[in-house]
Image: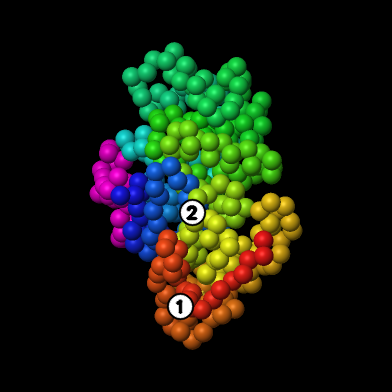
C-alpha cells in the first residue's frame, strides 16, 4: 500500500468566468521515505492538487470525484474534525511564499512555541520552548538565535524556520509548494539538501511542487509532470531526464538551464498554457505540440505504462524517442 495515493481526482473552481478545471482526473502516489516532485508551468493545477490533499480549498472550489487515500483511508470521506487531526499531525505543508509570512513583531521563538502548542495543547510553554530549540537544530539553525526577529534572518533561514514549524507535529508527509522560489542558487541547494536529509533521518515522505526542473533533478526520486490540470508523465527522475516520452516533458526539460551548470535557457516552449475554463479538446497539449495530429485534436490520450514505473499520456509515446544530451 502506498503512503498516499491520489486516484482520478477532479477539483474544479466555479467562477463567474466559468468552470476552471484545475485538477482534472489526476493519479499519482507517494511511498514512505520518497521525495516526489510535481512539476509543470504556472497554473497547471499543482497547487490546487496540494490544497485538495490538505482539504484547504477556497469556497468556490469543489472536489467532483476521485479518492485521496492516506494509509488506505480516503481523506475525502473524513470530517473536518478528523482532517484537523491529519493536517499538520500526519500531513504538513509549507505554503508558497510562507517564509515571508512570519510575524515581524513576535520573536521566532514565540511563533514556534505557538505553532507547536497549536498541535499539542498538553505541552507547557517551557516544554514547547525545548521542542522549538530541538527543531531549530534539526533544520540546521543555531538554537541561540531563536529569540531573534524575522528581519534578523535571511531568506534561507526563514525558510528553515517554516520547515521547522511544519515538522512541529512529526508529520509523515510534508508537502512543500515552491520551497526554493525567491532564494539564491546556493541557498536553494542548501534547502533541498536539508529536505533530503530530513527524508533520510526522519523517514519523511515529501511532495515538492515546483515549476523548476532543476529542483526536481536535484532532490526528487520520482516526478509527475502536470499540464493543464492533468498528469502527462510519471517516471523516476533518471528515466525522466534521460528518456522522456511526452513531448511536453522533453520541451520543458530543454526550456530549463542545465541541472549542474544552470546555463541559459535553451529553447522556449511555443505558445501559452491553455485557459482551464475552456481547455482544448483531445490532448490538451496539442496546440503547442510539434507532433500533433488529427487524432490528438480529437481524442484525449490516457496515462499508460510504457515501461515499469514509467507512465505517459500521449498517443505516440511508443513512437517518440527523445535523446537527451545533458
Ligand atoms: S497526444 Fe499528440 S498532441 Fe498530445 S503530446 Fe502526444 S503527440 Fe503531442
Find residue 125 and report its horizontal and vertical position in percent.
43, 15
Name the residue: 32% across, 46% down: 70
The residue range painted magenta reads 58-83
Name the residue: 54% across, 81% down: 292
Q: Is residue 19 visible?
A: no
In the picture, the quarter occupied by the C terminus is bottom right
* Element on which disc 1 rests: loop
Find residue 213 and report its horizontal and vertical position in percent.
60, 55
Name the residue: 56% across, 80% down: 291
Front-lying residue, 164 or 315: 315
Q: Which residue is mark 2?
A: 222
Q: Which mark is residue 315?
A: 1
Label 2 neighbour load within 10 Å: few <14, some 14-19, many 20+: many
Q: CA distance from mark 2 to mark 1?
A: 23 Å
Find residue 133 and report its horizontal and vertical position in percent.
52, 20
Which residue of the protein is positioned furthest toward the bottom in this rendering?
Answer: 294
Find residue 48 and report its horizontal and vertical position in percent.
44, 54
Amino acid at each position: 500500500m502506498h503512503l498516499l495515493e491520489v486516484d482520478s481526482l477532479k477539483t474544479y473552481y466555479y467562477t463567474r468566468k466559468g468552470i476552471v478545471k484545475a485538477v482534472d482526473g489526476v493519479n499519482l502516489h507517494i511511498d514512505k521515505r520518497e521525495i516526489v516532485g510535481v512539476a509543470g508551468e504556472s497554473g497547471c493545477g499543482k497547487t490546487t492538487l496540494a490544497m485538495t490533499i490538505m482539504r484547504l480549498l477556497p469556497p468556490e472550489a469543489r472536489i467532483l470525484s476521485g479518492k485521496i487515500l492516506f494509509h488506505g483511508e480516503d481523506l475525502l470521506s473524513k470530517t473536518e474534525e478528523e482532517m484537523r487531526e491529519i493536517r499538520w499531525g500526519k500531513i504538513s505543508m509549507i505554503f508558497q511564499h510562507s517564509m515571508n509570512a512570519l510575524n515581524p513583531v513576535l520573536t521566532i521563538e514565540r511563533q514556534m512555541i505557538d505553532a507547536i502548542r497549536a498541535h499539542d495543547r498538553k505541552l507547557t510553554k517551557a516544554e514547547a520552548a525545548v521542542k522549538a530549540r530541538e527543531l531549530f537544530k534539526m533544520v540546521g539553525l543555531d538554537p541561540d538565535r531563536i529569540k531573534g526577529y524575522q528581519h534578523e534572518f535571511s531568506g534561507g533561514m526563514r525558510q528553515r524556520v517554516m520547515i521547522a514549524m511544519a515538522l512541529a507535529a512529526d508529520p509523515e508527509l510534508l508537502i512543500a509548494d515552491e520551497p526554493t522560489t525567491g532564494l539564491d542558487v546556493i541557498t536553494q541547494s542548501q534547502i533541498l539538501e536539508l529536505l533530503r536529509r530530513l527524508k533520510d533521518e526522519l523517514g519523511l515522505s515529501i511532495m515538492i511542487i515546483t515549476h523548476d526542473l532543476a529542483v526536481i533533478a536535484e532532490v526528487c526520486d520520482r516526478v509527475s509532470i502536470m499540464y493543464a490540470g492533468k498528469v502527462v508523465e510519471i517516471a523516476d527522475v533518471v528515466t525522466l531526464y534521460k528518456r522522456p516520452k511526452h513531448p511536453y516533458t522533453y520541451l520543458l526539460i530543454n526550456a530549463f538551464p542545465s541541472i549542474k551548470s544552470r546555463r541559459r535557457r535553451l529553447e522556449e516552449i511555443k505558445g501559452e498554457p491553455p485557459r482551464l475554463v475552456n481547455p482544448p479538446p483531445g490532448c490538451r497539449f496539442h496546440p503547442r505540440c510539434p507532433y500533433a495530429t488529427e487524432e490528438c485534436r480529437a481524442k484525449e490520450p490516457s496515462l499508460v505504462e510504457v515501461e515499469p514505473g514509467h507512465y505517459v499520456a500521449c498517443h505516440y509515446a511508443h513512437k517518440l524517442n527523445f535523446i537527451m544530451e545533458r
